[in-house]
Amino acid sequence: MTVRPAVVVGVGLGVVGTVGVAAHVAPSLVALSSVGRRISPRLAGVGLRGHVALTFDDGPDPTSTPHFLRVLDALDVHATFFMLGDMARRAPSLAAEVAAAGHEIGVHGDTHRSQLRLSPRAVADDISRARDAVASASGVEPVWFRPPYGTLSLGGVRGARRAGLRSVLWTAWGRDWRAEATPRSVVADVLHGYVDGGTVLLHDSDCTSAPECWYSALEALPILADELRGRGLRVGPVGEHGILIPDPVAA
């Protein structure tokens, strides 16, 4: 799950020059950095101070997602679930259940493939299929898009925009996809990132990660909620995060 945006020239791109490569990977390189939070805040997931956007990727998964829904309900917390199109097609009733529980629905791509190894047309087609699948399954029109691995290409930004979606990455993550992750390590990794006014990335499925690693994120949630509330921070979905500032990459 480690993000390596520099590994770029792959299937579908052909031979491109240095300038072309730089333009292709620019969104990820900009947003997933401390500099990016300043020059491209909306794409990076920077919002209102005092608020934390809580997000989950890779579901909906019948094995794990219902557990997250129960814990979030007990904590009185709503989040944004970035769903994969192929997962939503397999579990449409669960996608609808996530939406019915008051959570925000986002799009995470149709299949979990890095955009940096796909042509712009393939990326746009993948996003469009995912948007249609997630909207059909959940019963709501998604607003937000986050690419698999956080590897957002220039074609991905444009493809998401054409699909009526706004791209957003994250400023803190729990590294919960690792086999060695624990609830305490997830909390520590999140709090090591940019949290106040930031966007937190966790996963409600292990479909692309170490088997059963989702337990670490699930069990981290009550601890994390206490830590964030103890700092006087409100926790909610991306839509309540106040990501309104136009920026040169995502606008």
Image (cartoon, rainbow, N blue to C red):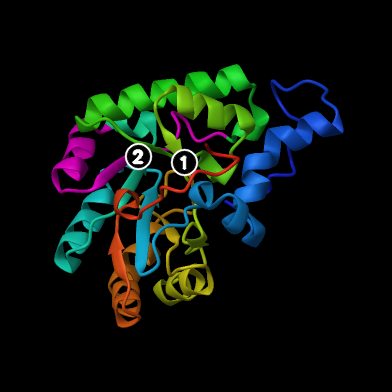
Task: Give the distance between the C-alpha atoms of the residues marked 2 and 1, in whole angstroms.
Answer: 8 Å
Residue pushed farthest bottom?
A: 230
- Which disc number belongs to residue 106? 2
Q: Residue 77: percent from the left, percent from the top?
A: 22, 62
Residue 52: % across, % down: 37, 64
Label 1's element? loop
Q: Amino acid at mark 2?
A: Gly
Contact between marks 2 and 1 (CB within 8 A): the answer is: yes
The answer to whether residue 197 shows anywhere in this view is yes
Q: Residue at x 29, y 68 (%)?
A: 234
- SS at badge 2: strand
Residue 240 versus residue 11 in the image, above or below: below
Q: Quadrant of residue 14?
A: top right
The residue where tag 1 is placed is 146
Residue drawn at 27 percent across, 27 percent down: 135
- Viewer-proximal residue among 85 and 43: 43
Residue 62 versus residue 130 in the image, above or below:
below
Q: Residue at x 73, y 29 (%)?
A: 10
- Range of magenta residues: 91-113
